[in-house]
Amino acid sequence: MRRKLALTIAAAAVLMLCVPAVALAAGSLNQVIDNLRLWVAGLLATAATVLLMIGGGRYMAASGDPGQIERAKGAIRAALGGYALALLAPVLAGIVRHIIG
């Protein structure tokens, strides 16, 4: 469990370091929020697609093993959650804009 947490934190740190300067180099705060929203939504959609492919591959390779089928279903559920977050990115950006003003 500790290893997964450490890998997740490391991956998040790498992603935050990779934020393109273009996303932050804008004329207004609203433009910065829009640029970051697009960037994060793209990352979420990409990660969700990879998880969906992994889940589908695991499901096909499970050959009836209940444990492997559950792992595959878990990956597919995570992919669906990623797609949902990517679709909700404009709503979340609107909430942030409303809070900031």
Image (cartoon, rainbow, N blue to C red):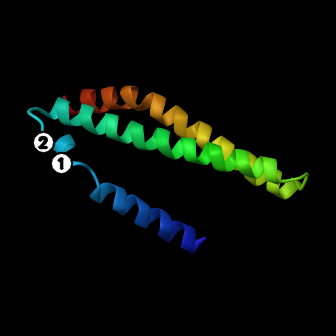
3 left or right of 59 in image: left
Residue 99 pos. (x, y %): 26, 31
Q: Residue at x 67, y 43 (%)?
A: 76
Residue 12 pos. (x, y %): 40, 58
Q: Amino acid at mark 1?
A: Ala
The residue that label 2 is drawn on is 25
Work out whether 5 lies above or below 50: below
Q: Residue at x 40, y 37 (%)?
A: 41
Disc 2 and disc 1 in contact, CB within 8 angstroms: yes
Residue 93 pos. (x, y %): 32, 31
Q: Residues within 10 Å of mark 2 (few under 14, many from 20)?
A: few
Residue 97 pos. (x, y %): 25, 29
Q: Residue at x 11, y 32 (%)?
A: 28
Q: Secondary structure at mark 2?
A: loop
Name the outermost residue toward the left: 27
The residue that label 1 is drawn on is 21
Q: Secondary structure at mark 1?
A: helix
Query: Gap in Å between the C-alphas at discs 2 and 1?
Result: 6 Å
* Label drawn at residue 99: none
